[in-house]
């Protein structure tokens, strides 16, 4: 006789497929949300947040892989991470991690106080370690799975940086998703259009799907999938933002339909 748990009965083959395809598991995502909010987190919201984090880290790893390939290396190092960020500003996420990583020391510029005195790195970090930094180690297994899926390996320092960036990014995403729930939608919403001198100003898009996320539906106690997607509009921009939203929406669409 095969004994199945109640959780297994509730989770069908489709759910298992979704979870096993994500390097960052829903349990980890929910743990990050608990660090920043008392709101409940729906399963589609956890899957969406895991998907978005995967999309962002994949873009970073692919950029670093390209930099390493130029030197005929498959083992990524921190300098490949710096190159990936330099070449694609869209992946400059989780920047709160930079203050805590030796990789970025000397690249952060100087900060001076009102009296003109140089602010030390210790002072810039603050007395309290942010939860996203403190919990970075929880992401190592997922980062290693993602590296393997992209056909590369990384030195320990690079893995640690990817752990930190993933953790800080997801923490910020969770915080913004909770803010969407609390405020009933995205209150700071806008768009930027590129203008070329001598050419007419482009008309704003009439049917931009991102604008549909600015108004929230649902109760005020649970973070839903659309709350996470709305938070993505606050954390990312450009092609990476659109791809992250599209991939997360596609991942959860069939589940929500059922």
Image (spheres, helix red, strand yellow):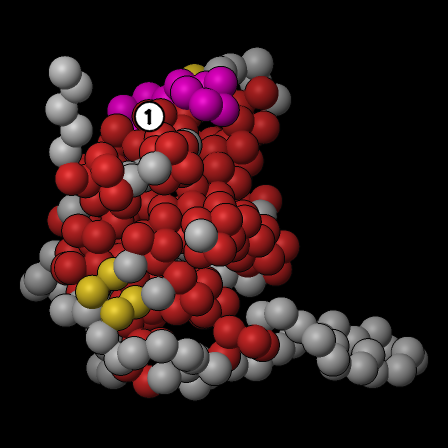
In front: 43, or 10?
10
> Is residue 214 left or right of 36 when viewed as pictured?
right
Where does the image place residue 229, in percent across and percent down from the top left?
Answer: 45, 63
- Residue occupying image coordinates x 19% and y 40%: 7
- Residue occupying image coordinates x 39% and y 68%: 227
Residue 151 sits inside the magenta stretch? yes
Residue 138 sits inside the magenta stretch? no
In front: 12, or 233?
12
Quarter residue 191 falls in: bottom right
In front: 101, or 188?
188
Q: Which quadrant is home to the N terminus?
A: top left
> Is residue 5 left or right of 9 when viewed as pictured?
left
10 Å crowding of disc 1: few (<14), some (14-19), many (20+): some
What's drawn in magenta, residue-wise? 148-161
- Residue occupying image coordinates x 29% and y 78%: 219
Q: Which residue is mark 1?
A: 144
Outermost residue toward the front in this view:
1
- Residue occupying image coordinates x 67% and y 72%: 208
Q: Can you say whether 30 is above or below 196 in the image?
A: above
Circle 1 — which element? helix
In front: 34, or 82?
34
Q: Is residue 83 visible to us here?
A: no
Where does the image place residue 210, in percent across and percent down from the top left?
Answer: 58, 70
Where does the image place residue 192, in percent across and percent down from the top left?
Answer: 65, 76
Where does the image place residue 243, in percent across and percent down from the top left?
Answer: 58, 51
């Amino acid at each position: 006789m095969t004994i199945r748990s109640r959780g297994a009965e509730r989770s069908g083959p489709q759910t298992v497929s979704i979870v096993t395809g994500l390097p960052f598991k829903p349990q980890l995502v929910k743990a990050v949300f608990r660090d920043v909010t008392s709101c409940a987190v729906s399963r589609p919201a956890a899957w969406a947040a895991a998907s978005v984090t995967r999309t962002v880290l994949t873009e970073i790893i692919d950029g670093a892989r390209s930099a390493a390939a130029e030197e005929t290396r498959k083992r990524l190092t921190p300098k490949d991470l710096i190159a990936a960020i330099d070449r694609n500003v869209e992946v400059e996420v989780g920047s709160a991690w930079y203050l805590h990583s030796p990789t970025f020391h000397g690249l952060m510029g100087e900060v001076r106080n009102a009296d003109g005195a140089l602010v030390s790195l210790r002072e810039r970090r603050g007395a309290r370690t942010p939860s996203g930094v403190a919990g970075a180690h929880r992401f190592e297994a997922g980062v290693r799975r993602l590296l393997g899926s992209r056909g590369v390996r990384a030195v320990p320092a690079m893995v640690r940086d990817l752990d930190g960036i993933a953790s800080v990014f997801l923490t910020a995403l969770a915080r913004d998703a909770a803010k969407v729930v609390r405020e009933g939608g995205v209150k700071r919403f806008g768009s930027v259009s590129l203008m070329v001198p001598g050419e007419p100003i482009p008309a704003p898009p009439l049917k931009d799907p991102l604008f549909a996320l600015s108004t929230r539906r649902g109760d005020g106690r649970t973070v839903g999938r659309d709350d996470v997607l709305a938070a993505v509009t606050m954390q990312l921009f450009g092609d990476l933002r659109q791809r992250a939203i599209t991939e997360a929406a596609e991942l959860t669409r069939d589940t929500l339909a059922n």
